Every structure is written in structure tokens, then in C-alpha cells.
Image (cartoon, rainbow, N blue to C red):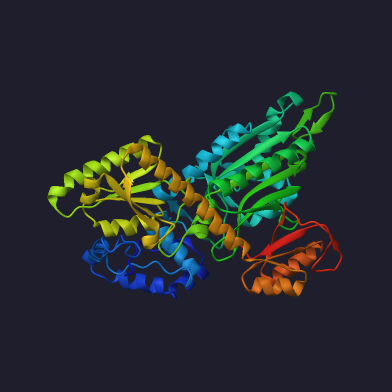
Amino acid sequence: MVVCLRLPSLTSSLFSSATANSLRRSPAFLRRRSIRQLPPSTLAAARFSAQGTATTEERADEKSKSGANSQERVITPRSQDFNAWYLDIIANAELADYGPVRGTMVIRPYGYAIWEAIQEYLNVKFKETGHSNMYFPQFIPYSFIEKEASHVEGFSPELALVTIGGGKELEEKLVVRPTSETIVNHMFTQWIHSYRDLPLMVNQWANVTRWEMRTKPFVRTLEFLWQEGHTAHATPEEAENEAIQMINVYTKFAYEQAAIPVIAGRKSRVETFAGASRTYTIEAMMGDRKALQAGTSHNLGQNFSRAFGTQFTDENGQRLHVWQTSWAVSTRFVGGIIMTHGDDAGLMLPPRLAPIQVVIIPIWKKDDDKTGVLNAASSVKDLLQTAGFKVKLDDSDQRTPGWKFNFWEMKGVPLRIEIGPRDVSSGSVVISRRDIPGKQGKVFGISMEPSILAAYVKDKLGEIQASLLGQATLFRDSNIVDVSSYDELKVAISQGKWARGPWSASDEDELKVKEETGATIRCFPFEQPQGIKTCLMTGNPAEEVAIFAKSY
């Protein structure tokens, strides 16, 4: 039996016309249209459901009963239409909804909780590495953007401008923050005077506006949330070390928290951030094998400090321009988690970032059993929360246990604990893993004794975290092809894979690859093979291999 959640469509305002048109032709969209024509009472019943299969014969009847609470509710199969699947997950898992302005999204509490988990980890790491949080204004004078030539050229098509304020035309246009290098330098110039003021290392958590023409929730929207770090240093070596240190922080986060096996490396000149000397990146392979730039760290050199006159007096009394960095990750990471780990049943969240790590589902049929089951479930919740786990007790009686199984599977909760009358009598619980469907992922008879249960939950959450990383790594490695010629590169890209090969060709050659294949150089990985290499495009000697892929 297939059931799932169906919430209001995200296609009407959030996405580009091309995306919306493709979705209108999809089976999922056609099903939405048929649901809209149902009577109000049926629509109300169809608001929530989830997709899943019966996990045990003992509880199969509970699964079947969930159909009474749901009409046809379908998550588009991932293999059928990856984009429609992605939008279904976001809607059904209640991660986001569309805003009234085209290209914007409203991040709902469950989606924001994932972002908060990302914030909590990174905030600690930023402070451990000597950075302080602060905040810069959202409105930036247009003249600031114009000061750095490559910066204004790179961002001009994406700028949102304010020309009227208080009912009057402004003397100078204001830019709604696309990034903050310019206003940061304006302030750094006022704060930095001597070598004693360096290094200056700050971070801000903020929103950013970029007028994107083709949007995708979490991945590319008109407005998004991010953190952006900005630092100023007395030497180029310090700035380079900072840029490398922060991309390493992002890499560790991706592997250890998000269970995403990113590839860290340096961007090509063509792909370098506007105004930077060098850009470092972490590139992640999504479930459709497209690349997602999940985080970047820029060595800005003295480009912005020269444009803004950000100088300091060194120990010898000489006036020098500071060397700078900037680095950022955004709510795009939430999209990356969805597209890396999700399946046809919904989200699959890594335990370290999951807003709820364990959901408890009490099960009873007779009123005489209800009190005992709920008391036991409440006790299990208390002991697990005391042990430091994030726990949800779903004790509502408006939905059947089977519906709850499907709903929380779709929300990606790593572990589910089931407690029924027999479990209460035996002092044990049943535990199911989200990452292993069916009977294989279910274990009966786990003792409710606090030390035993807490240790078991901790162990299983660790296994799930490692399993998700392992599966994603296997998928990534099986879809990267080593190539030695341009023809081989074109074949690999046409098959939807990543191509890895030696590269020392020109920027023009790189643009030719993009024009002819749709792929770009994602990065020159930090980890490089040894030995003599020959450029796949020109036949000339090459010191590095590059990774090419289509991307978001």
C-alpha cells in the first residue's frame, strides 16, 4: 500500500516558469489537480499522510487503517522525476512553503530547526577559531558596490535596488545585501589603524537577496539565510591560512554532521568569486548526480582593501593594505541534505542534525490499556531526554499508529520506538531504524531499563550516522569517471556522471566545455594523484586534475 502527505503545491510562486511547466506535466502535479477538485471534507482528510510499507505482520493492520485517514497521497518516486520528488518532500515534510513574492520561500519550523542545528555546530567552531559574531546593515550604498570593478560586474544582474524611501526618491540607490564585502570594508577602514588591530575576525548570521531568475527551494531563492565570515590580516600568509582553515571547518561539518562526503578543492579562475584572488569550495554530489556547491571560502587578497583604502601601520611604521578573507554556507545545505539522503518514503536525516532523533509511538486498542501504555511511553521519553537525546512523544489519538509510522518516516526521524500493552508487560520496546526499511530495520524486546535503552539508542544513532555517510560515499565514488580526453569527458557528462581528469587548458577552453556539455569545473581537489599528467584538452603537461560536472 502506498500513502503519503499532500500539502499545498510549491510550484505556483516559488519556481521559474520552466520548472513549473515541467511539474505541471508530471504525474504528481496532475494528482494535485485532482485533489483540489475533491469536496472540502475530503480535502481536510487529505492534508496529511506519509509513504511507507507495513513493517511487521503484528502491526500490518495499523498500517492499513491509515488509509481511513488519507485519500490518495503520493510522493513522486525519486527515479521518476527527481525535481518533483524534491518539491514533494519539502511540502510534505513541512520544511518550507512559497512566499507571496515570486522566488521567495517561507521556512517552516521543521525546516528552520534543521538550519538551527547547522548554526549551533558552526557557531561553536567559529568561536573556537577566534571569530566573533556581529551584524552589518542590510542596505548598502550603490557606490560601495561600484568600488570593486569585478565585484560589481559579477553581482550586477542579481542586485535588488531601493530607490524610494519615506515616499521620496533617494539621493543614492541602495543595494539590498547580496553579500557584505563592501560594507565590511567600509567599516574595517574605520576600525583598523595599526598592526595591533589585526587580525580582525568577525562573522554574521544574516539574510541575503539575489535576484535569481531560476529558483529552487533552499538551493536557489531570491532571499536566503546564511553566515558570512570576514577577516583582515597583516600578511598574505595569514589570509591564506585562514581561507584554508575555514574550508576545512566546512568539510568536517559536511562529513561528520551532515553525512555528506564533499570534495574540497580550489575553484578555477572562471569560477572564482567576483573580487577574490582564490576561491575554495566543497562540492557535494546530489541524488541526481548534479553537483551542489555547499560552501565556499575566499582569499580576497588586497582587492577590496585597495578599493576601500583599508590600511594599517606595521611594526616598522609602513602603511600597508590588509589581506582579507570571506567565507559562507547557507540554507542551501538543507537542500543538500534532502537530495543526498532522502528516498521515496521522504526525508532521511542524519541523527546529528535531526530536530527529532527519536519518536515514540504508543499503541493501544482497548481503553483499559491506554493509561499504562502512555505512562510507559512518557517514562521512556523522560529517560531518553535526560540522556541527552531529542525526543518526540506522539500521544495524539486523532491518528492511527500506522499513520504516525508513515508520517514520522516521511519527516526523516532516525529512530522510532513503539510501545504497546505487551511491551509494557515485558518491560521492553520495539525500535525501528529509518535508514533500513521493513523488518530488517526493526528490533523487538529492547529493555526499558534506562542504562540499557539509552546505550542502545546511542549506538543505533551512531550506526545510522555512519551508514548514511557510507552510502553517500559509495554513490559518489561510483559516479565519478576518470577521463584522459575531451571525448571521454563528453561521454561521462552525457551519462550524468562527474568527470575527473588532468587539466591545464585556458579559460576559453573551460568555457567551451561548459557551452558544449553543460558541465563546469567544480574544483581542483586538494587530494591530487601523483605522477606525470597530460591535459585532457590540449595534450600539454598538467599539474592537477579537475572535476567537471553539471550543477545546481
Q: Position of residue 469 (x, y in %)?
A: 54, 54
Q: Residue at x 60, y 61 (%)?
A: 476
Q: Is residue 12 above or below residue 233?
A: below
Any part of residue 435 in sight:
yes
Horizontal side of 212 relative to 403 (left or right) equals right
User: 516 or 538: nearer the eye?
Assistant: 538
Q: Is residue 47 left or right of residue 542?
A: left
Q: Quadrant of the N terminus?
A: bottom left
Which residue occupies the extreme left position in the image?
A: 368
How many marks do you count on the picture? Answer: 0
**Residue 66, x across and y down, in percent:** 26, 63
The correct choice, above or below, for 417 with respect to 547 in the image is above
Q: Is residue 176 visible?
A: no
Towards the viewer: 124 or 514: 124
Classify residue 183 by image quadrant: top right
| Quadrant that contains the C terminus | bottom right
Residue located at (74% from left, 66% from top): 511
| Residue 440, horizontal then vertical, whole percent | 40, 60
Residue 489 image offset from top left, x and y in percent: 72, 71
